[in-house]
Amino acid sequence: MANILTNKIFLAGIFAILVCQFLKLIIYSIKDRRFNLKHIYELSGMPSTHTSTAVALTAIVYYQEGISTLFVVWIFITIYVIDEVLWIDKTIGLHSQIFNKLSKTLQLQRLIPKTLRERWGHTYDEVIVGGVIGWLISWAVNNYL
């Protein structure tokens, strides 16, 4: 167990997740004007934790191994992750909006008491900020740990 806690690739990934989720907690608490610990579990919003983690892992693998097979694999995983978080809002978000309107129109509130969440995925700004955070974390882990 001690080896994984000193592994820079592991640390970069964990720090990317923790930093971004903590930032979401702060940002959403400021927006709501009240502290709510539930915001630490936000799936979407600023910054993109998915992008941050993928970029951090890709960058730290490059710093540790150079252009290796693992680095090439992580490039493709990162591209896939970014593509998914950018376009998921267009599909799931639209379906949620349609379902919520249909539920109201047909008065299905007794069957479905809660509306579906309509905000999914990330905007380009959220992905860019997440990517920058991920790269900064991997750089710091590589140089200072």
Image (spheres, rainbow, N blue to C red):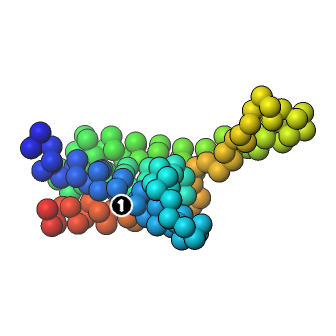
Q: Position of residue 32 (x, y in %)?
A: 59, 66
Residue at left offset 46%, top offset 67%: 26
**Amino acid at pointer 1:** Val
Q: Is residue 30 left or right of residue 94?
A: left
Compare residues 113 and 130 and report the one nearer the observer: 113
Which quadrant of the figure contains the N terminus?
top left
Q: Residue at x 29, y 50 (%)?
A: 13
Give how far across and how far down residue 58 sits, in percent: 31, 51
Describe the element under mark 1 as helix, strand or loop: helix
Answer whether residue 47 is visible to the viewer in this image. Answer: no
Residue 123 vertical placement versus 98 (above, below): below
| Residue drawn at (18%, 52%) of the image | 8
Q: Is residue 6 left or right of residue 29?
A: left
Please identify the residue farthest to the left as the structure is shown: 2
- Where residue 52 appears, x then y in whole percent? 40, 56
Q: Is residue 40 left or right of residue 75?
A: right
Residue 44 visible in the shown view: yes
On the image, numbered disc 1 is attached to which residue? 19
Residue nearer the viewer, 98 or 61: 98
- Up the image or down, 24 lies above or below 2; here it is below
* Location of the C terminus (image quadrant): bottom left
Quarter of the view holding residue 94: top right
Front-most of residues 124 and 46:
46
Total numbered labels placed on residues in the image: 1
Label 1 crowd (10 A; few <14 / some 14-19 / many >=20): some
Where does residue 135 sit, x and y in percent of width and height?
A: 33, 62
Please state if 101 lies on the left or on the right of 46 as rendered.
Answer: right
Residue drawn where x is 54% and y is 64% of the image: 28
